[in-house]
């Protein structure tokens, strides 16, 4: 067979937690090193998970009380499901299509422990009835709970076949994909005991007294029980390739079956039953046993189990044509123990990694083969050391065998995915890496982990990493982002992000357009995107210079047209990325761009007006403009009155930033006087006395030019740099506004004050340089909000592309959404990356209640909490498991639901009596402590 058939299923995501391994990467490293994760003490041995009762309840929206009622198996599976979908490169709460969940859990005594400890639970923890506890731990609801919390709409199927549960779940998921029941499938299982009894003996004689699991070894004496959980994400191979998914391996065939009555007892395995299942898997795959180079066996190391399993394998594998190389046999249980319902997925993960990496891990504790096994018929070999996959023709292939107590068996064929080389990205194009989390601590940890990943995994394409983070992760409130052209630079930037302060949040954006004097010769970032209209086309046609128009010889004219084009193109670029302004503000010439973006003028009208305005300014007598770092009184004291009288106050940028305009010789005289007085001045790169009385000589022609445009009420709020306030619809639609604008003083400081009065508004300078943004930061009312620039200053060594990417990263970090799908200009694919750093705490029968705050906020004098409010707060605290509630705390925002609401209503009715007339519907309508207390006082006639 040359390749996978049309029914091949891709493994696109992996996740798991096993003894000694917090994730799949750690499991693989332990397997290669033969590192045993079993915990041993004087009582016996067990494969423990690190903090099995730890759970990030708040992340998934559970109250502490509800989290306590959840079986730890369900909690671990929920976190593994999130990590598996992240590993597949999909936002776990926004996976396209129908996503099925196929999984099962082991049998534990957790609900019995909760019921037994209910009366001794923390005083403020209301666990609820036996029904509520069973609802949180019944095996039936493990998959449905994942579908509920992750908003998955495919089948949620619970599988229970004892030790083969998770591999049977994988087969069931494959059938669901083939039948069209789902487009993507999570498949796996878990067994988690939070307080296992370590023992070296058991009634059936299945547990190794030595505490070592030795599959296939002459010293094998039994297995070692253990905890574990794992998921794989499956998708039809053709769909995965079309979507750009990372394919870890391909599943080409699977089968399940039962031994039936062909065995000596209910718990005894059957050679014939296992043989039938193995042959059925090969029939489904179209392969032959000689195509398999590695079998990840069930391998429990029990005296009865291993010989029967090898006998069944021999019947299938030995009957095939002679092999050139031996088939290697192994069992992951040698390092993690027997994880019961998670055993099958643990073996599958091992086989997937082996075919993907081309390395076969050792079976730990193996020295001499068990004489009860016939390892010569195939021949099978058990390797005690890590070995490279033998070189051969075609893809690497492995098989996974899983046997269930009770006779339900599963066999799956795993094949290496022969992926072609991805297309190379454009050279040195900067990428934006985005991270988000539910807390600031978590996002810092995520930044550190990703930085370490970038340093360690130098083979990954930065473009693919950025794409995966941008499109395959949930968008959560605490954010960090970094822009960089290389993995090394990205790692350094992320390290700084992990240590730096959180950016100030923003909910809206103001576009601020600079005026003439800020322009410079530099390639614009606007040229890297397709959208923007004629102005963008012109800029892209001449990326190295400001554009000019035929017949216009004036440098000033060309620069004004060029500045308008660059500003419009940059604004169009931002808008093509989904960043729409809620406010616009322009400085002098920049006001024309602001008007176009706001919808006051069309692009054609704006460009035409800029051309006419520029021609008229160029026709004025020689003049210029002078920036002065002083206030009006200082200027008047330093400049002779006769000279100052010939000049006009063109611009007020800030209390100590003025611009004077007028004839060139008067400006030069003023500059000399101001310099002599120790005041800093700078002559602007403007060859005309704009915003001065000189405009009066061309006012008529300017009015005629304005008459050709048709100003409309803006669709976006527009702050005028002429009036300093937001323009009304009537003002914006008045053509005479533009004549007054060209003649009058630019009141930019007043306009910035109006802008800063809008809370949570990020300021984005849209144009070259940072002149306007600097003026915003210098304003007396500046409050520390984010102020960003789109393009670099002439003195910056940074490229325009990198500067723009850094602006996009900073913008997204504040909470402003960016359409990253519009960002990409080259083919991308999803790649595995570190998963979300959950921040959990222990939940169990004896765990302490969770404080809502370190200390309750002090009450204002004379406003002591009344009795009804205290009763409501107490009831909420008991059912939610949260201390320190205040009047503003909302029952449902703290993790309450309809079932918990029923308990709260019962407690409140018990305390307040039936006159309260309280129902669950009442709680839905008045869900804060204070609001519900007020409602209860009203209905029950209770006074404060």
Image: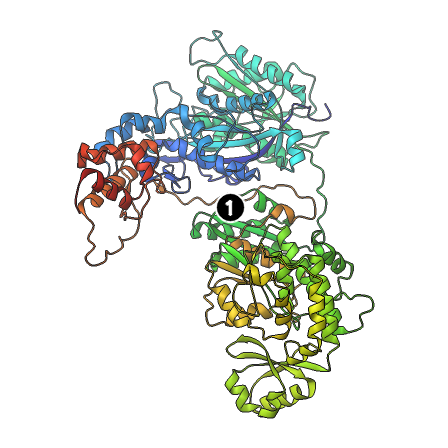
Q: How many marks?
A: 1
Residue denoted by label 1 = 475
| Residue shown at the point (61%, 62%) measured from the top left | 594
| Residue shown at the point (47%, 30%) measured from the top left | 147
| Residue shown at the point (60%, 69%) measured from the top left | 587
- In the rendering, at what x and y percent does residue 192 appear? 39, 31
Give the left or right position of residue 728, taking residue 252 as reference: left
Comparing 316 with 845, the one in front is: 845
Which residue is farthest top? Answer: 261
Q: Residues within 10 Å of mark 1 (few under 14, many from 20)?
A: some
Q: Looking at the figure, which quarter contains the N terminus?
A: top right
| Residue shown at the point (74%, 60%) measured from the top left | 539
Q: Secondary structure at mark 1?
A: loop
Looking at the image, can residue 18 be seen?
A: no
Looking at the image, can residue 238 be seen?
A: yes
Q: Quadrant of residue 209?
A: top left
Comparing 179 with 673, the one in front is: 673
Task: Please tell me whether residue 776 is drawn above or below residue 375 in the rendered image.
Answer: below
- In the rendering, at what x and y percent does residue 98 appear? 55, 29
Give the left or right position of residue 517, taking residue 813 as reference: right
Q: Quadrant of residue 130?
A: top left
- In the rendering, at what x and y percent does residue 202 appear? 35, 22
């Amino acid at each position: 067979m040359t390749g996978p058939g049309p029914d091949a299923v891709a493994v696109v995501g992996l996740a798991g937690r096993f003894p000694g391994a917090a994730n799949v990467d750690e499991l693989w490293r332990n397997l290669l090193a033969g590192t045993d994760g079993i915990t041993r003490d004087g009582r016996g041995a067990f494969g423990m998970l690190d903090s099995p009762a730890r759970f990030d309840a708040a992340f998934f929206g559970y109250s502490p009380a509800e989290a306590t009622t959840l079986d730890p198996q369900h909690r671990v599976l929920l976190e593994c499901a999130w990590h598996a979908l992240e590993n597949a490169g999909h936002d776990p709460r926004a996976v396209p299509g129908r996503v099925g969940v196929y999984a099962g859990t082991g049998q534990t005594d957790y609900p019995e422990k909760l019921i037994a400890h209910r009366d001794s639970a923390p005083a403020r923890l209301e666990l609820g009835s036996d029904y509520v506890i069973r609802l949180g731990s019944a095996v039936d609801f493990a998959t449905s709970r994942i579908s509920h919390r992750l908003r998955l709409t495919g089948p949620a199927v619970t599988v229970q076949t004892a030790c083969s549960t998770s591999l049977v779940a994988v087969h069931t998921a494959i059938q669901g994909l083939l039948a069209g029941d789902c487009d993507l499938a999570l498949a796996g299982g878990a067994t988690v005991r939070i307080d296992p009894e370590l023992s070296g003996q058991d009634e059936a004689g299945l547990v190794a007294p030595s505490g070592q699991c030795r599959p296939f070894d002459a010293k094998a004496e039994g297995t070692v029980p253990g905890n574990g959980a794992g998921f794989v994400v499956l998708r039809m191979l053709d769909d995965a390739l079309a979507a750009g998914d990372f394919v870890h391996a391909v599943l080409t065939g699977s089968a399940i079956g039962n031994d039936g009555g062909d065995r000596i007892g209910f718990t005894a395995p059957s050679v014939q039953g296992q043989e039938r299942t193995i042959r059925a898997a090969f029939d489904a795959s179209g392969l032959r046993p000689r195509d398999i180079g590695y079998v990840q066996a069930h391998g429990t190391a029990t005296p009865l189990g291993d010989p029967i399993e090898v006998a069944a394998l021999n019947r299938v594998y030995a009957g095939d044509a002679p092999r050139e190389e031996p088939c290697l046999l192994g069992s992951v249980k040698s390092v993690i123990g027997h994880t019961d319902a998670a055993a099958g997925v643990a073996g599958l993960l091992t086989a997937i990694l082996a075919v993907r990496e081309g390395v076969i891990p050792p079976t730990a504790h193996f020295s001499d083969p068990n004489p009860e096994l016939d390892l010569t018929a195939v021949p099978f070999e058990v390797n005690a050391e890590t070995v490279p996959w033998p070189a051969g023709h075609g893809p690497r292939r492995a098989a996974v065998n899983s046997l269930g107590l009770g006779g339900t068996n599963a066999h799956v064929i795993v094949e290496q995915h022969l992926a072609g080389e991805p297309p190379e990205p454009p050279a040195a194009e900067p990428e934006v890496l985005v991270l988000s989390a539910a807390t600031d601590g978590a996002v810092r940890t995520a930044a550190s982990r990703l930085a370490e990943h970038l340093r360690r995994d130098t083979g990954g394409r930065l473009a693919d990493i950025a794409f995966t983070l941008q499109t395959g992760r949930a968008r959560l409130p605490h954010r960090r982002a970094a822009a960089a052209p290389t993995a090394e630079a990205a790692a350094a930037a992320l390290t700084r992000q992990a240590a730096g302060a959180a950016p100030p949040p923003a909910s809206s954006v103001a576009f601020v357009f600079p005026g003439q004097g800020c322009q410079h010769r530099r390639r614009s970032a606007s040229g890297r995107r397709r959208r923007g209209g004629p102005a963008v086309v012109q800029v892209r046609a001449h990326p190295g210079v400001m554009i000019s128009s035929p017949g216009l010889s004036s440098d000033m004219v060309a620069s004004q047209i060029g500045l308008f084009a660059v500003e419009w193109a940059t604004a169009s670029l931002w808008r093509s990325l989904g960043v729409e302004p809620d406010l616009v503000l322009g400085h002098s010439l920049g006001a024309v761009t602001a008007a176009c973006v706001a919808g006051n003028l069309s692009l054609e009208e704006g460009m035409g007006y800029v051309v006419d305005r520029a021609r008229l300014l160029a026709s004025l007598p020689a003049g210029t403009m002078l920036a002065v770092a002083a206030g009006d009184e200082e200027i008047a004291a330093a400049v002779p009155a006769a000279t100052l009288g010939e000049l006009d106050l063109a611009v007020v940028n800030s209390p100590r930033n003025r611009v004077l305009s007028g004839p060139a010789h008067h400006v030069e005289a003023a500059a000399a006087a101001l310099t002599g007085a120790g005041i800093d001045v700078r002559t602007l790169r403007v060859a005309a006395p704009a915003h001065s009385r000189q405009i009066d000589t061309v006012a008529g022609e300017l009015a005629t030019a304005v008459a050709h445009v048709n100003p409309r009420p803006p669709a976006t709020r527009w702050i005028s740099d002429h009036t300093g306030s937001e323009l009304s619809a009537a003002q914006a639609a008045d053509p005479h506004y533009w004549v007054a604008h060209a003649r009058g003083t630019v009141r930019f400081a007043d306009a910035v004050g109006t802008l800063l009065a809008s809370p949570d508004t990020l300021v984005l300078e849209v144009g070259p340089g940072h002149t306007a943004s600097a003026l915003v930061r210098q304003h007396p009312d500046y409050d520390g909000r984010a102020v960003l620039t789109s393009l670099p200053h002439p003195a910056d060594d940074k490229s325009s592309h990198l500067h723009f990417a850094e602006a996009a990263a900073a913008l997204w970090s504040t909470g402003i959404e960016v359409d990253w799908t519009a960002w990409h200009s080259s083919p991308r694919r999803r790649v595995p990356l570190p998963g979300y750093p959950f921040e959990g705490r222990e939940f169990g029968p004896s765990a302490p209640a969770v404080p809502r705050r370190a200390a309750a906020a002090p009450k204002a004098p004379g406003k002591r909490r009344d009795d009804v409010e205290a009763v409501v707060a107490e009831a909420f605290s008991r059912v939610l498991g949260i201390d320190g509630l205040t009047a503003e705390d909302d029952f449902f925002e703290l993790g309450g639901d309809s079932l918990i609401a029923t308990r709260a209503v019962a407690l409140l009715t018990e305390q307040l009596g039936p006159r309260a007339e309280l129902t669950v519907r009442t709680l839905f309508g008045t869900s804060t402590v204070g609001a519900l207390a007020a409602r209860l006082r009203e209905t029950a006639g209770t006074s404060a």
